[in-house]
Amino acid sequence: MKKVLILLVVAMVGFSFISCASTKAVQTPPAEKKVVVLGADGIPQPDWVYKTVSSQDMHYESGYGKMSDKQNSIKRATVEAKNKIASWISTSVKEVVVTYVNDAGSGDNRQAMDAMESISQQVAEATLSGVTTEEMWVDSEGGVWVLCSIPLANIEKSFEPAAEAVAEAFVESDAAAAANAKMKDAFANLLKGAN
Amino acid sequence: MNKRQLVLGCILVLVSLYTGCTTSKGASESSVPNQRLALLDVSAYDSNVYVGLSGPYSSQERMVEMAILNCAKNILLKEAIALDSKLVMQWSTQAGLLSFAKDAKAYYDNTRLSQVIDSLEIITIEFDEQAGAVVIARNTAEKAKRRPYQSTYASDGKPTWISTYPQVKGYQFGVGSSKAYYFLNDSLEASDFEAAQNILDLKTEHSFLKSLTTTQSGSTDSMENALYQAQRGLLEDFSILARYYDQETDTYWSLACSKE
């Protein structure tokens, strides 16, 4: 009997250990496997290829290029990164949206096509100084990725001419002051009329 | 001497002649361009030693004259080289890349060419069928310094700088390549120029960008982008540190460096 009792106790301890162990195993989610993408020469893909890089004093953009040779691929990748920087800081963005209805009839005659089409054009231009290619990675197919940076101090400088133009535009001339007074009068009269 | 000995002797002579011919042919095809580039390698010297090559001319005097002139030109290029490049690119979501055109120029100050030639001290002059005269000379007006980088080679025999840019504090590097032209000096000038432009691409002093993005949505969605870039830069302490010829692709490679 004593032997049976000892066996039972051992079995219970054993079960409790197993159950604890399995509960623990269930609670811990399996560690996520990070897929490592290898590029040319077996260099792993850096994070900046798919993640935004930021810092307090620099602005970063990445660019990609795949041309017939490495040099032109670098050229294209850097110009794309610089274009992203230019769009980001662009001092002159014009957007023209043209919307028109393409109505081809009604009822049975109506053609099955999208009636609305819109075309928008965006022009961006900027002058950049001090853009540096911080890092470069070549993927397994020979495409070149670059990470370019520009100091924020340089961007402030590029804003200076635009800021001056804006300041000039807002300097109140005598004529502008007179027009402003006239506008206020007109509004006042309009409001009187409405009441 | 009997007839059998005579036949054996003839066979031996023919075999040795054939072996000799094939060996020399193999050596000339595989290593001559890089042997030629070794003639231009001044990495063992201090930084005030320059090399100039002429390309083939009708007389040795003319070749030496041109090589000295090119040597002096390299000294002036080291002082300052101004680069100017323009690029136009157009692509769309439907057709991919539509155009990619570039135009690049380099300028240097040649007003002091004769003064620089006067300060040259010729170290060696060698002649080569394709390189013409190769002159190695010291610029006595410049202090001797160590070069910032020496080439290292990968297991396949190619220099490591072809795949990975060297990292040396205070310097920036550029790698350029060119398909082989008829004359060696043209091939080298083209790859050196591309290496200089590569420095400008990687570190832009001034650039102007203008882009036009047209987006159309409706029955067909499409986006077209046209981009123009103009950039300029001035490289100081510019020099070509190493060159390599890749026989597989018939391409010349240059490693350029300038002060950061």
Image (spheres, coloured by chain):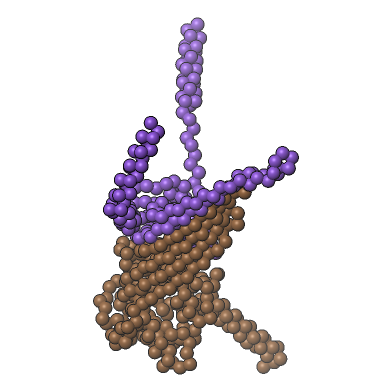
Chain colours: A purple, B brown
Counting from the top left corner in percent of width and height, residue B122 is at: 33, 86
Q: Which residue occupies 49% across, 51% down? A: A96
The furthest residue to the right: A108
- Give the camera-side residue of B2 and B198: B198
Counting from the top left corner in percent of width and height, residue B44 is at: 35, 75
- Give the camera-side residue of B170 and A182: A182
In the picture, the quarter occupied by the N terminus of chain B is bottom right
Asked whether residue B124 appears in the rendered view, the answer is yes
Based on the displayed image, in which of its 4 quarters is residue A92 positioned? bottom left
Q: Which residue occupies 34% across, 38% down? A: A188
Based on the displayed image, in which of its 4 quarters is residue B71 positioned? bottom left
On screen, residue B81 versus residue B156, left or right, reads left
Q: How many marks?
A: 0
Tell me: residue A190, above or below residue B255. above
- Give the camera-side residue of A114 and B69: A114
Based on the displayed image, in which of its 4 quarters is residue B151 positioned? bottom left
On screen, residue A37 versus residue B41, left or right, reads right
Q: Which residue occupies 57% across, 80% down? A: B25
Counting from the top left corner in percent of width and height, residue A163 is at: 32, 54
Asked whether residue B128 appears in the rendered view, the answer is no
On screen, residue B168 versus residue B197, left or right, reads left
Tell me: residue B122, above or below residue A5. below
The furthest residue to the top: A1
Q: Which residue occupies 41% across, 51% down? A: A88
Counting from the top left corner in percent of width and height, residue B253 is at: 46, 70
Tell me: residue A43, above or below residue B175. above
